[in-house]
Amino acid sequence: MPTAIKKSFQYGQHTVTLETGEIARQAHGAVIVSIDDTVVLATVVAAKDAKPGQDFFPLTVDYMEKFYAAGRIPGGFFKREGRPTEKETLTSRLIDRPIRPLFPEGFYNEVQVVATVLSQNPEVDGDIPAMLAASAALAISGVPFNGPIGAARVGYVDGQYILNPTTTQLASSKMDLVVAGTEAGVLMVESEADQLSEDIMLGAVVFGHQQMQAAIAAIHELVAEAGKPEWEWAAPVKDEALIARVKDVAQADLEAAFGTTSKSVRSGMLKEATKKAVAALATGEEGAPSEKAVKDVLFELESAIVRGRILAGEPRIDGRDTRTVRPISIRTGVLPRTHGSALFTRGETQALVVTTLGTGRDEQIIDAIAGEYKERYMLHYNFPPYSTGETGRVGSPKRREIGHGRLAKRALAAVLPDAKEFGYTIRVVSEIMESNGSSSMASVCGGSLSMMDAGVPLKAPVAGIAMGLIKDGGRFAVLTDILGDEDHLGDMDFKVAGTTNGITALQMDLKIDSISPAIMNKALEQAKEGRLHILGLMQEAQGDPAELSAYAPRMMSFKINPEKIRDVIGKGGAVIRALTEETGCVIDIQDDGTVTISSADQAKSDEAKRRIDQITAEVEVGKVYEGPVLRILDFGAIVNIMPGRDGLLHVSQIAKERVNNVSDYLKEGQVVRVKVLETDEKGKVKLSMKALLNEEAPAAAPAPAAE
């Protein structure tokens, strides 16, 4: 019988257990991590050999949430899990980003990591357990991997950091930060925050890195007892002779290309230099290098040129110094019929961002394993191939688009008005028109401008900026507003978004094994400088707050007695359906009696409210009502005085004189005016025509004056 090997450690308020050896034994590595009833299995399988001609590292990470983990059956027709949800995609990226740079250079064997949530405690998200399980599974597998990594979530409540806060604690936290790293330093940060300072954010990263050392130590203990033999793999030896030959052929052309500030011209020159080098060296003759080998050396030369110039203090590719933001152009109100729009252009990166306002019926319904919930704010990011002058597939969003959209969404969430103040559903769509560096941060800037153009009362404008890093030994340079090539050839992608008051979102990914807090502090300081510069330009372009678009629905909210909800809805929804069809309004009713009416026509909204007021109005004693006679009785009549409310008009209350036959005075369908005499505890209403006649009788004539 298989025997499980377990290691446990205290992690904040939780006890974490790592387990291997019993389940999924044919995988190269398999570890189960349990944290307070949340259980995640991570498996690792790697190909023993790279595919012939493979020139990239084929790492795949899949995070899957099973509905049975929370005791639920999936919705939909098929009743089984389908395509990955946005949450699953984002968590897959969260695992991928810190482990990818820890595989050795030149390792091109296919590796697949699968993390499966087997049991879900709604108070403990599966992402941190999945990251720890993936790290441990890689560490024990024997696959070349320079780990393990640790991972931690950090909250901030009442001025104190909280390690791995629960879902309930996060609801009152001003920060939700996930940090991953090795023993040496931080590799990845993902965070949203409520306008917190740079010092608080950096402190959270350092706190998380310190605390995760307990997880790393436990994984080392697991490897010592259950680890498999390390693979016999060696990095390919560099061909110094080929490097020298490529330099002779292409060095001058590459330097000339990177001396050109235009991306399109530079790209053309680089393609020509590559074509020339390949034609001269990859001749196909016996002993000649392959085209791939030549291109690999060319990439190394490109990287050395760009990085060397920056570290030497020379101008960057486009002529800027390390702190300058590219020229910015802003236009709002770009599209005539949308509710809000903005065109944000920074250098050769451009985002057309559009805001649409909807009603409660437009909220996104999320069917998650922890239960169904709704979102009133959505941000969708699209990156078509033409934005980089390329052809490609256009269709459903890829992982990168989902990840960039979520980052921009997080950056703006902190400044949205409360639903009670602004009850609209908000959808923001960022269409990337050009891309040469940080289109996600352009989406943040454009999203803020677009929502303000739509009349959304944001707490403050938000801007975002991407920082880069070039590091060689003890020398480093932090770059403000990085270009696409600087991202591709550099060591860090560090995105920071926020207001003038503080940071709302932060994301960091490294291509090296770690960076120090001093470098992070430098990056945060430069990012704040750049962010404030962009916010100033946005403020100039935006001007005074915009009014709500003429094409946006107008909303009014008011409360009714919750006991009257059934009257407004009617049997089988007949009443509210008729109201909707006859007035053309969208009407939403909450369980607490809050009614929201939406329409682009104010008069129609007013009419819908008037009719709902009639339906829900309480009968008032002494008030006069007008309504049809519904039924003649021997002792009186039943009169409808308001929608859903009838009253008894007794024969004695019909006329001043004695009434022997009710039908002599009233007919069914006849509209009469009646006065409410009284209502009892059961809601029965007594009416009178007689009292009304008495009130409306002419006053007695004054007596004649004495002579």
Image (cartoon, rainbow, N blue to C red):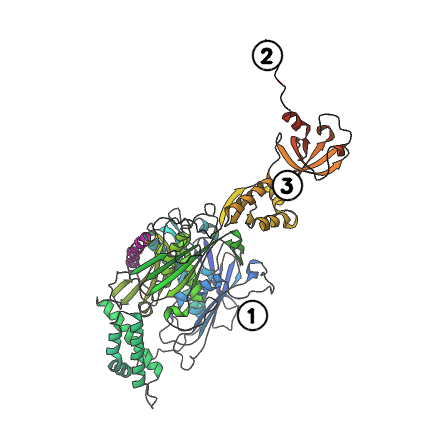
Q: Main secondary structure of the magenta part?
A: helix
Q: Position of residue 235 (x, y in %)?
A: 35, 77
Task: Give yes or no for residue 401 being in the magenta stretch.
Answer: no
Q: For the magenta stretch, what is the residue range?
A: 515-540
Q: Mark 1, mark 3: which one is toward the viewer?
A: 3
Q: CA distance from mark 2 to mark 1?
A: 121 Å
Cα gap from disc 3 to disc 2, whole angstroms: 52 Å
Residue 124 place in picture, x, y as percent: 48, 56
Residue positioned most to the front? 707
Location of mark 2 (residue): 705
In this view, 355 is above or below 597: below
Residue shown at the point (39%, 64%) measured from the top left: 432
Q: Which residue is mark 1?
A: 1
Q: Which residue is mark 3?
A: 643
Position of the C terminus, as image quadrant, is top right
Check if mark 1's residue and mark 3's residue have beta carbons within 8 Å.
no
Q: Is residue 588 visible in this depiction of the protein? A: yes
In the image: residue 673, left or right of residue 255 = right
Indicate the secondary structure of the residue bearing disc 2. loop
Query: Element under label 3?
Result: loop
Mark with earlier residue (3, 2):
3
